[in-house]
């Protein structure tokens, strides 16, 4: 009997070991996602790869070049976003890596990218069959590179992450530089009982590199079910910036959104509402503390209502709370925001910036809001101030 028990225990131990040897991708950098792992034979001085598996942990196709910080091409110095090394993809070149994941889950991939020779360079990021092309024409800051995030749904327990340069330049070595690749499994937060918004505080989002102070750009995404910012769409041509409290002023919590590029940077969410019912929308608007030139303002939309909210700087606060009341016309109402102005930073006059948005709430208006004809909280506050001053 003891022999049988020992055999059973050994069997279960073997199964557990087998289970945990299939390691799922953890949140954070993927294997050699920074391209700093030394290849067999070391980093060559002219590390052009035109064949399979020369870069550790990656498979390549086409002209793939490992570039080093400070490397020159003609009169141009190639940009390496992080560390000493990065990868440049030539004409129709690609790199790919297989990752163990959880089937049915949503994952966000964060990476840094820079263009080199051409103004119209782009980078295709795919987890076949899904793919997204990132336009690198717009430089959002003077560093010459930007972090991005895109999201995919895992349709099996293993996905293949592919970066492809689909362009065809006269110089076959021209193409985007990529670096600092990470992955994060996303969760859609539960909707609070007193708030119709999902992830209205932006606390759930893509992987944020701790050593990067540029935030993470969220490009166009029209599928709120598969989004690096769960619950939200990025409707516009330009990206919005996902920021953290380690490097920016954030109204509450650890994360927020900085709206960029005026009307070209729109985020939206469809919320559940009851037709003909009065609701209130509130949100925090502020300054990111990144030397963004004022004025800063947000255009807020709730169904057929719209309101222009200007940020008014106060000495003891970097943000203020705004309120908009609306009557729902349907069972789902669109809530959307964009920056009124096209702002840049005052120190370099070039890096794109804008108002910070956070802590977005939508709730059914209470009776006092209805009594005052939908004017809402601002009227109540004004009456209270008047009473305080008079008495």
Image (spheres, rainbow, N blue to C red):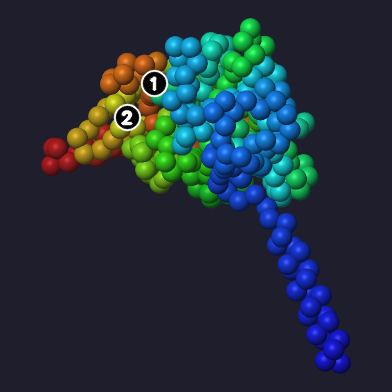
Most distant residue in the top direction: 170
Instruction: Find disc 2 in the rendering and name its residue.
Output: 290
**Drawn side of residue 252 relative to residue 89, left or right:** left
For the residue pair 321 and 133, the one nearer the viewer reads as 133
Q: Residue at x 57, y 49 (%)?
A: 27
Question: Which of the 4 image quadrants contains residue 341?
Answer: top left
Question: The C terminus appears in which quarter of the rendering?
Answer: top left
Most distant residue in the bottom direction: 1
Q: Position of residue 41 (x, y in %)?
A: 61, 40
212 vs 76: above or below:
below
**Drawn side of residue 214 relative to residue 206, left or right:** left
For the residue pair 16 and 174, the one nearer the viewer reads as 174
Q: Position of residue 352 (x, y in %)?
A: 40, 20
Q: Residue at x 42, y 41 (%)?
A: 211
For the residue pair 87 and 285, the one nearer the viewer reads as 87
**Drawn side of residue 156 relative to residue 56, left or right:** right
Q: Residue at x 47, y 23 (%)?
A: 71
In 3D space, how far apart are the residues under numbered discs 1 and 2 (Cα atoms)?
Answer: 13 Å
Label number found at residue 142? 1
Mark 2, secondary structure of its residue: loop
Mark 1, secondary structure of its residue: loop
Q: Position of residue 119 (x, y in %)?
A: 53, 10
Question: Which of the 4 image quadrants contains residue 213?
Answer: top left
For the residue pair 379 and 338, the one nearer the viewer reads as 338
| Total marks in image | 2
Pair 1/2: label in front: 1
Q: Position of residue 361 (x, y in %)?
A: 47, 39
Label number found at residue 260? none
| Sequence-first disc among 1 and 2 | 1
The answer to whether residue 191 of the structure is visible from this angle is no
The answer to whether residue 47 of the structure is visible from this angle is yes
């Amino acid at each position: 009997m003891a022999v049988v028990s020992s055999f059973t225990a050994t069997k279960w131990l073997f199964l557990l070991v087998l289970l945990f040897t299939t390691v799922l991708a953890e949140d954070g950098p993927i294997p050699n996602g920074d391209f700093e792992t030394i290849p067999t034979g070391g980093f060559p001085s002219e590390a052009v790869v035109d064949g399979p598996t020369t870069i550790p942990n990656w498979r390549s196709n086409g002209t793939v070049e490992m570039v080093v910080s400070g490397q020159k091409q003609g009169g141009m110095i190639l940009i390496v976003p992080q560390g000493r090394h990065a990868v440049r993809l030539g004409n129709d070149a690609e790199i790919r890596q297989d990752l163990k994941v959880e089937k049915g889950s949503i994952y966000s991939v964060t990476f840094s990218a820079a263009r080199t020779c051409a103004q119209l360079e782009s980078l295709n990021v795919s987890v076949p069959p899904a793919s997204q092309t990132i336009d690198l024409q717009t430089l959002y800051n003077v560093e010459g590179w930007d972090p991005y995030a895109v999201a995919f749904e895992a349709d099996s327990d293993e996905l293949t992450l592919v970066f492809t340069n689909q362009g065809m330049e006269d110089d076959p070595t021209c193409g985007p530089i990529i670096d600092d690749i990470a992955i994060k499994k996303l969760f859609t937060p539960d909707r609070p009982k007193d708030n119709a918004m999902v992830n209205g505080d932006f606390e759930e989002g893509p992987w944020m590199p701790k050593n990067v102070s540029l935030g993470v750009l969220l490009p166009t995404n029209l599928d709120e079910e598969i989004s690096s910012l769960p619950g939200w769409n990025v409707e516009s041509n330009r990206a919005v910036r996902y920021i953290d409290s380690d490097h920016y002023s954030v109204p509450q919590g650890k994360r927020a959104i900085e709206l960029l590029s005026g009307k070209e940077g729109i985020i939206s969410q469809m919320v559940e509402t009851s037709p003909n019912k009065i609701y209130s929308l509130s949100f925090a608007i502020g300054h990111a503390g990144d030397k963004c030139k004022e004025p800063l303002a947000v255009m807020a939309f709730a169904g057929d209502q719209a309101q222009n909210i200007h940020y008014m700087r106060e000495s003891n606060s970097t943000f203020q709370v705004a309120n908009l009341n609306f009557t729902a016309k349907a069972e789902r109402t669109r809530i959307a925001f964009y920056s009124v102005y096209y702002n840049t930073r005052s120190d370099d006059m070039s890096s794109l910036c804008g108002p910070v948005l956070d802590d977005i709430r939508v709730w059914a208006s209470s009776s006092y809001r209805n009594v005052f004809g939908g004017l809402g909280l601002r009227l109540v506050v004004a009456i209270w101030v008047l009473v305080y001053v008079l008495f």
